[in-house]
């Protein structure tokens, strides 16, 4: 069991990266608490069910394959316990093809909570533009709303 806030973050980053690389949805699902809120620059995405998260997972896998991602390298740059059961963390995501970035690295702020004895991601804010491939994959088929507007299906 991770002991420091940084270890909590790195543990979940490792689970999700390997799950995406191996197309292992069950491992991916284990890292997330539902309902899930994901935010990009300008859009809030609500993922309410495991089926919707699986769709998002599949869209991310398709996107990564299309741009040639061979490895996910994520660096936790800050993590802090806000309570015994809550960590707020920021990492920088690198999507690589044979060791070289295929897109510009981007920061992600996550809220992690200890739920039923397991650390899970409860929300994530991706510093990517609305039309970025990652943002499009996350929002595809999920309830979204532009910041300051009503929800819609994308």
Image (tube, rainbow, N blue to C red):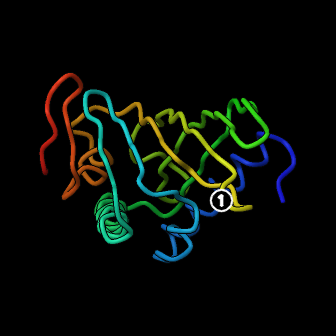
Residue 129 found in image quarter: top left
Crowd tier of the residue under label 1, counting other residues whose Cα lies within 10 Å: few below 14, some 14–19, many 20 or above: some
Taking the image as shown, residue 83 lies to the left or right of residue 106, namely right
Residue 112 found in image quarter: top right
**Residue lying farthest to the right in this orientation:** 3
Q: Position of residue 73 (x, y in %)?
A: 59, 51
Residue bearing mark 1: 14
| Front residue of 28 and 94 | 28
Under circle 1, the secondary element is: helix
| Front residue of 70 and 84 | 84
Taking the image as shown, residue 28 lies to the left or right of residue 65, namely right
Residue depicted at 29% across the width and 37% down the height: 44
Q: Position of residue 147 (x, y in %)?
A: 24, 25
Q: Position of residue 106 (x, y in %)?
A: 46, 34
**Residue lying farthest to the top in this orientation:** 148
Figure disc tally: 1
Residue depicted at 53% across the width and 33% down the height: 109
Residue depicted at 29% across the width and 44% down the height: 45
Taking the image as shown, residue 56 lies to the left or right of residue 86, namely left
- Quadrant housing the N terminus: bottom right
Q: Is residue 147 above or below residue 67?
A: above
Q: Position of residue 69 (x, y in %)?
A: 43, 60
Residue depicted at 23% across the width and 54% down the height: 142
**Residue lying farthest to the front in this orientation:** 116
Q: Is residue 109 above or below residue 54?
A: above
Q: Is residue 116 above or below residue 24?
A: above
């Amino acid at each position: 069991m991770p002991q420091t806030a940084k270890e909590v973050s790195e543990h979940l980053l490792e689970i999700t990266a390997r799950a995406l690389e191996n197309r292992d949805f069950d491992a991916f699902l284990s890292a997330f608490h539902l309902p899930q809120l994901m935010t990009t620059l300008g859009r809030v995405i609500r993922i309410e069910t495991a089926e919707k998260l699986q769709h998002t997972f599949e869209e991310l896998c398709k996107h990564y394959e299309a741009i040639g991602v061979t490895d996910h390298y994520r660096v936790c740059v800050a993590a802090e316990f806000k309570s015994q059961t809550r960590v707020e963390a920021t990492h920088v995501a690198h999507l690589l093809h044979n060791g070289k970035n295929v897109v510009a690295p981007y920061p992600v702020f996550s809220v992690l909570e200890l739920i039923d004895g397991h650390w899970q991601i409860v929300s994530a804010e991706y510093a990517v533009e609305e039309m970025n491939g990652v943002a499009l994959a996350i929002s595809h088929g999920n309830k979204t709303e532009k910041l300051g507007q009503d929800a819609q299906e994308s």
